Amino acid sequence: MPKGIYRAARIFDGVQWHEDAALRIDGGRVAGIGPAEGAPLAVPVPGWIVPGLIDLQVNGGGGVLFNNDPTLGGIARICAAHAAFGTTATMVTLITDRPEVTAAAISAGGQADATPGFLGLHLEGPHLAVSRKGTHDPALIRPMAEADLAALVLAAGALPNLIVTLAPEAASALQIGDLAAAGAVVSLGHSNCDAASARAAFAAGAGMVTHLFNAMSQLGHRAPGLVGAALDGERIWAGLIADGFHVDDTVMRVALRAKAGAGRSGGIFLVSDAMSTIGSDQREFTLNGRRILREGGRLTLQDGTLAGADIALIDAVRHVHRGLGLPLEEALRLAALHPARAMGLSDRGHLAPGARADFIAISPGVEALGTWIGGLPAAGVAQADVAQAGAGVRA
């Protein structure tokens, strides 16, 4: 099992910074953080050590879109592409598609437990509202049938983790409750529901909202919509795409303030909503037979509809840190500790003793320099040198 000591000028454990410190790893988990001067054999790591990022909505990467390659190999390529940008846990996401594609994706996810960085599957659709379809193919959107529910319940038991994004218009409270009872995280999204319907879905077992503000009923002063219900819900987590295009910076600030006091039971977390372009030179690709164009940091259908995002999660961290003015530690928590809590995972998103040794090295400019998953180097510059230097302290 991975064992070693890593030294950096600064280490952020998820709560506080440690200056000129050393991170001790034993058995693939964090053994502790102490002064670097007490660890003469520690391997020097460039930049600062921080918890690995956790992305709960990743449609693709490395030139692979999961809808187009719902296989074990597709999952591996997507996770590897995002590991290069500091993401140590990835919920690989399938957008609304045909039943056979969904079945193939679930089968692949059930075989991917040993894939570095794979956290589980996020099934975004097909049980959505056509009126808020976004980039989803309206011909494939449909209400949840009993056979769909049965398949999702089985998937929840077969996968490490499962998020199901649905609209209350397309699934009953009983179905939502059954999914939650089976262990799935039920997230509301692509919905035109009113606030009362959203609250009923939350009461039934939904605990999350997918890409807050996008493809949903908005906050009005007399009609709060799904946005209002999410911001008002004390135990509700909401993902936010912070790429500068999906949500205006002012609106993001308002949302972050509204959920700032939620703490462990709910709040905001960042997602990339990344497509296949991350870690590739793709200029366009297809989704359900439709062209997606890459231009100026945006991904759109030919009619201009936003179609996912052209960022990795670390880009969202940098945006809320620099663009919104959040302290770096708060920006990091939004992309590590908060998504872990949203999934009910207590052993990641931080570097306290006993946590998984998922960590990254970043520059002061918030660029990923290296990634470790379970204490093993996964990606980044100079990883070979780091691995070689650490050979004497690895078990």
Image (cartoon, rainbow, N blue to C red):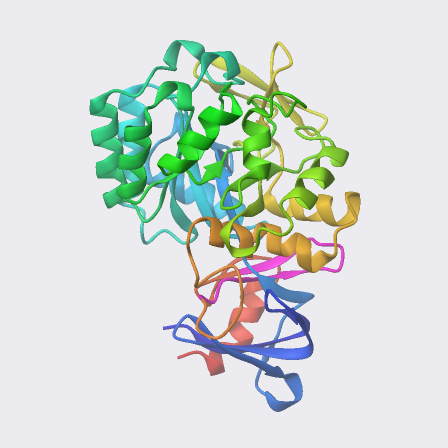
- The image quadrant that residue 125 belongs to is top left
Q: Quadrant of the N terminus?
A: bottom left
Task: Examine the rendered structure and indicate whether residue 183 appears above or below residue 370.
Answer: above
Q: How many dots with numbers?
A: 0
Looking at this view, is 237 or 315 the one in front? 237
Residue at image coords 43%, 71%: 29
Res. 311 in view: yes
Q: Position of residue 13 (x, y in %)?
A: 59, 69
Residue at image coords 30%, 21%: 144
Write down the region rendered in magenta: 356-371
Q: Residue furthest front?
A: 222
Task: Examine the rendered structure and indicate whether residue 38 appears above or below residue 212.
Answer: below
Q: Is residue 207 found inside the magenta-colored segment of the image?
A: no
- The image quadrant that residue 6 belongs to is bottom right
On screen, residue 64 versus residue 360, left or right, reads left
Q: Quadrant of the C terminus?
A: bottom left
Residue at image coords 43%, 16%: 288
Looking at this view, is 8 or 323 the one in front? 323
Q: Is residue 370 found inside the magenta-colored segment of the image?
A: yes
Q: Position of residue 218 (x, y in %)?
A: 61, 23
Looking at this view, is 313 or 336 the one in front? 336
Task: Examine the rendered structure and indicate whether residue 370 appears above or below residue 242.
Answer: below
On screen, residue 227 versus residue 186, left or right, reads right
Res. 188 in view: no
Looking at this view, is 85 or 314 the one in front? 314
Q: Position of residue 199 (x, y in %)?
A: 46, 32
